[in-house]
Amino acid sequence: MFNELDPLLLSQLRLAIMAHLMVVRETDFNTLKTQTGATAGNLSAQISKLQEAGYIEVEKTFKNNYPLTLCKLSPKGVEAFETFYANLKSYFDNHNGG
């Protein structure tokens, strides 16, 4: 039997955001935009969904008089990503007789 996958992380862009944050833990909006290749509007919408779920924390501030949006992985986000990864891995393990 397969474990259920978190539907929030089944989105390619949300998964890419979370995967990047699992490595760096915190980054700015423009870096995420570059890393994911997403448009600003789509990235902003997906960040909002992850923030509403409590997976990431968003801090809006200024750096050199320019707006700066920082995204940080929350403990709940780490747990959600690790669970998603383990559940996804179980699909392969079950298929290979694992």
Image (spheres, grey):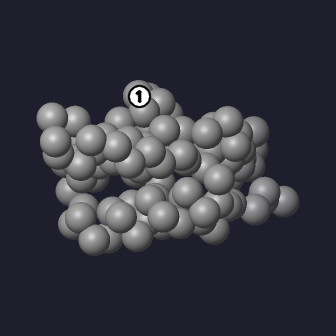
- Judge whether 65 appears above or below 47 on screen: above
Q: Is residue 11 above or below residue 61?
A: below
Give percent across and percent down for residue 85.
62, 44
Where is the N terminus found, in terms of image quarters? Answer: bottom right
Q: In the image, is residue 48 above or below residue 89? A: below
In the image as oriented, which residue stretches furthest toward the right? Answer: 1
Q: Does 37 sit left or right of 76 as displayed?
A: left
Q: Quadrant of residue 74?
A: top right
Q: Which residue is mark 1?
A: 24
* 27 sits to left or right of 9: left
Residue 97 visible? The answer is yes
Q: Which amino acid, by three-letter code, is at mark 1?
A: Val
Find residue 64 and report its image quarter. Answer: top left
Disc 1 element: helix
Instruction: Give residue 53's position: percent from left, percent from top.
Output: 64, 60
Quarter of image, res 9: bottom right
Q: Residue 83: where, in percent of width, then height?
A: 71, 44
Q: Is residue 32 visible?
A: no
Residue 19 spot, x, y in % from top left: 46, 42
34 vs 11: above or below: above
Residue at the location (63% across, 44% down)? 77
Residue plotted at (70% across, 43% down): 76
What is the quadrant of the C terminus in the image? top right
Compare residues 88 and 98 and report the one nearer the observer.
Answer: 88
Q: Say few, some or many: other residues with alpha carbon within 10 Å of mark 1 (under 14 / 14 to 19 / 20 or more).
A: few
